[in-house]
Image: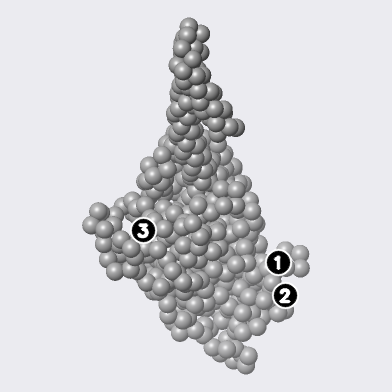
């Protein structure tokens, strides 16, 4: 009829500039006018055909008649009342005398009184997609009403499908633009926080959510970060311990989760529940951030302050953005690792240059202690030197302590027995890193006057399987990291080579001084021998020259005896040398 044609034209026009929710509500308004009904409702049937969700009431129904729970209410078809007969019978159903129906199950509190109703299924193939129902017409519903309602119900679904396709296409194009922007920022290596904020904003915007935020895994807990659309301060400081909330299910299963009513699924009171209640969030989508190593590093949360889920297209969009967030985090972590590595290489080069240029062993040990403390950022540092037995420490070199503190520890620092963390370091010849050494089972207490310490990092100084001593570091703000551990290993290796070099230099210097002493002794010996050899020869020469000119026989005999005695002395000297 002309009235129906006019209604169809109006709905097409109305759909151009209104949302899907508004279109469904206006369709119900038109159906009410055409049938003379006073109430109208529209339910969406889930794909499993076992449950449905109230999508909307008509404007009049919400304003004048029905105060029952509205949009987003979820029902199991098997438990619903007579209004789902159209689902069971898979055809329109009229109840012109609701009160006389034996299988009716009553009405929810606040629901409009029901006199008569007409419910029509919207079918596509074998699937029931939706139910449009009207009620309380002053007179009985008839076949003309069935045709009118069926026609407009089908029309509304077709328009809704078209709008959904248009919305999906727009979201897809917007998604491509967002991905292009994300890729540009990743390639340009811009600020990660700014990029995550952009992704969170676009996640909420593309799916029409009220809020969105990230939860990242940090030291065994989930910490919220980059909050959008969140009003309460408590949310920012919330920490999810393992097992608290559905976010941990996402982390462990690495699969997206949709929560249509958080309070229904989480009846047990907990800190998260109270904060979520205060924030007013009800429904959630949670998508894992999976790294290139197939590890879940966090969760993208998107939430609404109303009941209901997220459709397939919206979830696909969120999964894409979550994937981009994971790539961005991985890329920035990789860049940070490269920068840290380059910084470590530069630092180690500086350490190597400083240590290898120092040839005095005492000064070298002080330099190792000082550099280790500075580079790692610890409050205290020490180098312990092994004694000759290789089982204990004969001395310590400190950095970070006052002269009074060092003097107070004199004679108390060498570990004895088989217990203690320092003893363990000597025995196992590997690094030890502790967040709180006082809670370690090997801890045996501090000597009197020793500063209180918690965080600890120790590494052996080993050169060619020979242990020289250990480097100890303590009290770093935030604790020592695995990067610190790797760095101190490298420093200890450089230190070991430098110490060996200094020891070789000391040994060479000692040998050189010994050779100088030997050379001096040789010169003294040669001088003495020269004197011992020259003296008899001088006597012999003088005696023989005098003997040649002497005429008295007694004097000649005396001179001859002098020469003979000198010759004997010469012979004895040669025997001594040989």
Circle 1/circle 3 CB separation < 8 Å? no
From what the image shows, is residue 259 above or below residue 366? below
Residue hosting label 2: 90
Could you say which is closer to the camera, residue 394 or residue 375?
A: 394
Q: Is residue 245 left or right of residue 173?
A: left
Could you tell me residue 514's position as x and y percent? 47, 36
Tag of residue 63: none
Task: Determine crowd level at label 2: few under 14, some 14-19, many 20+ residues with C-alpha closer than 10 A.
Answer: some
From what the image shows, is residue 396 above or below residue 243? above
Quadrant of the drawing holding the C terminus: top right
Farthest-out residue, top: 549
Q: What is the secondary structure assignment of the residue under circle 3?
A: loop
Residue hosting label 1: 123
Could you say which is closer to the camera, residue 86 or residue 397?
A: 397
Could you tell me residue 198's position as x and y percent? 47, 46
Q: Is residue 238 left or right of residue 97?
A: left
Residue 98 shows in the view: yes
| Residue 67 placement: quadrant | bottom left
Residue located 26% across and 62% down the image: 408
Could you say which is closer to the camera, residue 109 or residue 477?
A: 477
Task: Of the two numbered discs 2 and 3 on the same chain, state the one appearing first in sequence.
Answer: 2
Task: Of the two numbered discs 1 and 3 on the same chain, state the one appearing first in sequence.
Answer: 1
Residue located 49% across and 15% down the image: 553
Residue located 42% across and 77% down the image: 270
Circle 2/circle 3 CB separation < 8 Å? no
Could you tell me residue 4's position as x and y percent? 60, 59
Residue hosting label 3: 475
């Amino acid at each position: 009829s002309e009235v129906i044609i006019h209604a169809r034209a109006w709905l097409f026009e109305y759909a151009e500039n209104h949302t899907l929710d508004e279109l469904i509500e206006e369709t119900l308004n038109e159906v009410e006018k055409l049938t003379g009904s006073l109430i109208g409702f529209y339910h969406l049937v889930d794909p499993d055909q076992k449950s449905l969700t109230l999508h909307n009431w008509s404007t009049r129904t919400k304003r004048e008649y029905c105060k029952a729970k509205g949009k987003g209410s979820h029902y199991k078809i098997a438990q619903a009342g007579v209004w789902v007969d159209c689902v069971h019978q898979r055809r329109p159903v009229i109840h012109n005398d609701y009160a006389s129906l034996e299988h009716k199950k009553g009405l929810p509190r606040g629901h409009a009184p029901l006199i008569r109703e007409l419910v029509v299924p919207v079918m596509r193939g074998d699937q029931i997609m939706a139910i449009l129902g009207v009620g309380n017409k002053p007179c009985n519903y008839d076949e003309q009403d069935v045709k009118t309602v069926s026609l407009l119900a089908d029309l509304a679904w077709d328009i809704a499908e078209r709008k959904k396709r248009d919305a999906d296409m727009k979201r897809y194009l917007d998604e491509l633009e967002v991905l292009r922007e994300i890729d540009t920022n990743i390639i340009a290596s811009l600020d990660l926080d700014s990029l995550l904020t952009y992704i969170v904003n676009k996640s909420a915007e593309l799916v029409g959510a009220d809020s969105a935020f990230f939860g990242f895994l940090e030291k065994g807990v989930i910490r919220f970060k980059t909050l959008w659309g969140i009003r309460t301060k408590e949310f920012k400081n919330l920490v999810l311990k393992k097992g608290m909330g559905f976010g941990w299910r996402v982390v462990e299963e690495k699969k997206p989760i949709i929560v249509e009513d958080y309070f229904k699924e989480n009846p047990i009171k907990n800190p998260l529940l109270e904060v979520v209640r205060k924030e007013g969030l009800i429904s959630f989508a949670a998508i894992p951030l999976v790294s290139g190593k197939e590890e879940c590093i966090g969760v993208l949360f998107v939430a609404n302050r109303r009941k209901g889920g997220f459709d397939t297209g919206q979830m696909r969009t969120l999964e894409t953005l979550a994937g981009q967030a994971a790539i961005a985090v991985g890329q920035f972590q990789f860049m940070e690792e490269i920068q840290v590595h380059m910084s470590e290489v530069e630092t180690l080069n500086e350490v190597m240059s400083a240590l290898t240029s120092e040839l005095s062993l005492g000064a070298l040990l002080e330099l190792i202690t000082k550099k280790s403390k500075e580079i790692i950022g610890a409050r205290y540092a020490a180098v312990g030197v092994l004694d000759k037995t290789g089982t204990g420490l004969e001395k310590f070199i400190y950095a970070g302590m006052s002269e009074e503190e060092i003097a107070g520890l004199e004679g108390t620092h060498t570990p004895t027995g088989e217990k203690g963390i320092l003893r363990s370091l000597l025995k196992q010849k590997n690094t030890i890193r502790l967040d709180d050494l006082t809670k370690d089972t090997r801890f045996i207490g501090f000597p009197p006057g020793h500063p209180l310490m918690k965080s600890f990092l120790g590494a052996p100084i080993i050169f060619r399987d020979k242990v020289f001593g250990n480097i100890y570091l303590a009290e770093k703000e935030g604790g020592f990291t695995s990067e610190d551990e790797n760095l101190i290993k490298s420093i200890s290796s450089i230190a070991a080579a430098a110490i060996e070099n200094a020891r070789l230099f000391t040994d060479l210097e000692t040998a050189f001084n010994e050779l100088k002493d030997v050379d001096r002794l040789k010169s003294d010996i040669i001088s003495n021998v020269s004197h011992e050899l020259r003296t008899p020869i001088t006597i012999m020469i003088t005696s023989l020259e005098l003997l040649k000119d002497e005429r008295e026989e007694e004097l000649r005999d005396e001179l001859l005896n002098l020469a003979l005695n000198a010759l004997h002395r010469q012979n004895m000297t040669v025997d001594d040398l040989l």
